[in-house]
Image (cartoon, rainbow, N blue to C red):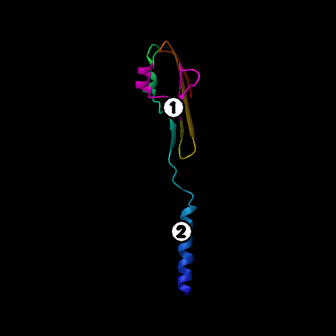
Amino acid sequence: MQRLIILVIFSSFVTLSGCIFPGVYKRELQQGNVMTDEMINQLKPGLTKEQVTYVMGNTLAPATFNPNRWDYLYWSKDPRDNVTQQRITLFFDDNQLSRIEKQQ
């Protein structure tokens, strides 16, 4: 009986120690549209909305009150809690790209 109690206590300690190990694996968290420099460099004034969608993909944050403004957002958090944010706003006139605003 005493061996069984010791075995249960030892098993409990081993199980619980796995829950509080300080080097717990954390994976990178990404949200939004992934934007590479190559994609951004392809954006030029005069491109149509269809061409921009082909290069950048669909925007995840459409402007409800202004269909001529598209916002592309990207947010990333690595395992060490370093946060990367990137935002590009595209403006269109007559279905053509007229202006690009970048924020990093």
Tag shown at residue 45: none
Q: Please, what is the three-letter code of the amino acid marked with disc 1?
A: Leu
Residue 15 lies, with reference to residue 27, above or below; the image says below
| Residue bearing mark 1 | 60
What's the magenta region?
Answer: 49-74
Task: Using the image, tell me which numbered label, if any, was put on residue 15.
Answer: 2
Q: Is residue 46 visible?
A: yes
Q: Earlier in the sequence, mark 2 or mark 1?
A: 2
Instruction: Indicate the position of residue 90 as horizontal and vertical percent values.
Output: 52, 21
Q: Secondary structure at mark 2?
A: helix
Task: Give the percent coordinates (x, y) of residue 39.
Answer: 43, 26
Q: Nearer the viewer, residue 15 or 58?
A: 58
- Quadrant of residue 73 within the rendered picture: top right
Q: Name the residue: 53% across, 83% down.
A: 4
Which residue occupies the foreground of this view, 43 or 68? 68
At x 45% / y 16%, what residue is drawn? Answer: 44
Q: Please name the residue shown 56% across and 86% down the image.
A: 2
| Mark 1 residue crowding within 10 angstroms, few (<14) / some (14–19) / many (20+) | some
- Find residue 61 and report its image quarter: top right
